[in-house]
Image (spheres, grey):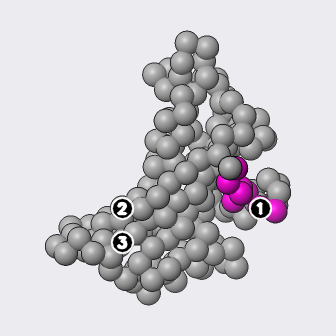
């Protein structure tokens, strides 16, 4: 059974929703003997991009602190075509939806102007003392929505 793609309605329209990207340099240790990027490396790139996205929005203090921390609740990747060691990669990241205590994040790995993979996942803000979800502050929510505009 094939799962429906979240890259909707088509790759170009989906990519047009992204406003933030960061370059990714593939390291040799992230590849196999043929120079293909290993599938687990995509998830490391997603993490790197997610952190840089929140740093860009100056939200690391809100989402990664002693009292509250963001944890990955789910994460998936749709591999579309291979990435290689020398590919000039741009990782696009966006908050697709902001909930009460969670943020749905989407990722697009692009090389040579071609979408190579798409990702999506949810992060949940957790109270470190109770281990339970806690609301995202209005200030953080407003900053994300202001940056993403009508896309979030």
Mark 1 closeness class: few <14, some 14–19, many ≥20 residues within 10 Å: few
Task: Tell which of 133 and 44 is nearer to you.
Answer: 133
**Mark 2 in CB contact with mark 3 (< 8 angstroms):** no
User: Which label's residue is closer to the chain start, 3 or 1?
Assistant: 1
Name which residue lies at 49% across and 35% down: 40
Residue 134: quadrant of the picture: bottom left
Q: Give the CA distance from mark 3 to mark 1.
A: 27 Å
Look at the image and tell me whether residue 108 can be seen: no
Check disc 1 and report the residue beneath it. Answer: 8
Check disc 2 and report the residue beneath it. Answer: 71
Name which residue lies at 54% across and 40% down: 42
- Tell me where residue 122 appears, x and y as whole percent: 49, 64
Look at the image and tell me whether residue 8 can be seen: yes
For label 2, the SS is strand
Q: Which residues are magenta?
A: 2-9
Name which residue lies at 52% across and 83% down: 142
User: Which label's residue is closer to the chain start, 1 or 2?
Assistant: 1
Q: Residue 125 — which label?
A: 3
């Amino acid at each position: 059974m094939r799962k429906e793609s979240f890259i909707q309605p088509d790759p170009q329209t989906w990519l047009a929703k992204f406003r933030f990207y960061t370059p990714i340099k593939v390291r040799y240790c992230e590849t196999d003997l043929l120079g293909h990027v290993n599938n687990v490396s995509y998830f490391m790139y997603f993490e790197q991009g997610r952190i840089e996205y929140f740093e860009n929005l100056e939200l690391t203090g809100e989402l990664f602190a002693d009292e509250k921390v963001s944890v990955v609740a789910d994460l998936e990747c749709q591999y579309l075509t291979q990435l290689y060691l020398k590919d000039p990669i741009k990782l696009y990241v966006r908050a697709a939806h902001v909930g009460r205590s969670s943020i749905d994040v989407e990722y697009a790995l692009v090389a040579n102007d071609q979408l190579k993979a798409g990702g999506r996942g949810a992060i949940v803000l957790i109270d470190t003392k109770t281990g339970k979800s806690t609301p995202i502050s209005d200030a953080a929510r407003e900053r994300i929505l202001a940056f993403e505009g009508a896309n979030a």
